[in-house]
Image (cartoon, grey):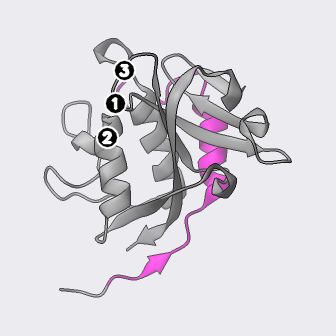
Amino acid sequence: MAVLKTKPYNREDAVQYATRWALGRNPRFYDYTNLGGDCTSFASQVIFSGATVMNYTHVYGWYYINGNEKSPSWTGVDFLYQFLIRNREQGPFAQEVSLSQIQPGDIIQIFFGNQQHYNHSLAVTKIGFPNNPDQIFVATHTPDFLDRKFSSYQWVAARYLHILGVNM
């Protein structure tokens, strides 16, 4: 097995992408809004902007070729979580952290109401002081928001994914 090099995750590029495309669609990527939602595809696009490396491992990787050729982790909330937390191969990797450790460019996943699973991915665009839900701002698709206060969501549970770096 080859030894992988690790590079830093470019949070600035990730946030710039989120800001540019939160209220629109990048024509390079399929819009999954009418197929269950585009939130995790958008989160993946944000991560890719900061990582610039995909993992083309069939089924368990994280990649997008076109609307029909993509990994489950590109568009699936739990699949993205599992990839980022477990990835030891090429591509971005993350750890679940507390709210106080989240940074711009990271991902928050939530579930609403009586749902029993995480069903929405949000990209962190800004953090104020002190670091609490009123001072965390996010961008997302389906529905589309830019710099929405995290506290405005009616979530039952949240998990915070801090991107640690990118394996090359």
Instruction: Using the image as rendered, state which of residue 138 and residue 20 is in the foreground.
Output: 138
Query: Could you tell me residue 51's position as x and y percent?
Result: 48, 60
Callout 2 touching callout 3 (CB < 8 Å):
no
Above or below residue 96? Residue 134 is above
Mark 2 closeness class: few <14, some 14–19, many ≥20 residues within 10 Å: some
Q: Which residue is mark 1?
A: 117
Left or right for 82, reference 121: left
Q: Position of residue 91 (x, y in %)?
A: 36, 63
Q: Is residue 12 magenta?
A: yes
Q: Earlier in the sequence, mark 1 or mark 2?
A: 2
Task: Identify the magenta region.
Answer: 4-32
Q: What mark, if any, has residue 78 been given in the picture?
A: 2
| Quadrant assignment for the N terminus | bottom left
> Which numbered dot is residue 115?
3
Q: Nearer the viewer, mark 1 or mark 2?
A: 1
Hey, which quadrant is residue 69 in on the image? top left
Q: How many marks?
A: 3
Q: Is residue 29 magenta?
A: yes
User: Residue sitting at 49 percent across and 30 percent down?
Assistant: 26
As drawn, the residue found furthest toward the top would be 34
Question: Which amino acid does the dot numbered 3 rest on?
Answer: Gln
Residue type for callout 2: Asp
Which residue is at the far right?
129
- Tell me whether circle 1 and circle 2 mark residues in contact (CB < 8 Å): yes
In the rendered structure, which amino acid carries the disc numbered 1?
His
Quick check: 107 left or right of 82?
right
Foreground mark, 2 or 3, reads 3
37 and 21: which one is in front? 37
- At which x and y percent is residue 167? 39, 72
Above or below, comparing residue 158 to residue 166 in the picture: above
Do the numbered discs 1 and 3 sit on residues whose CB atoms are within 8 Å?
Answer: yes
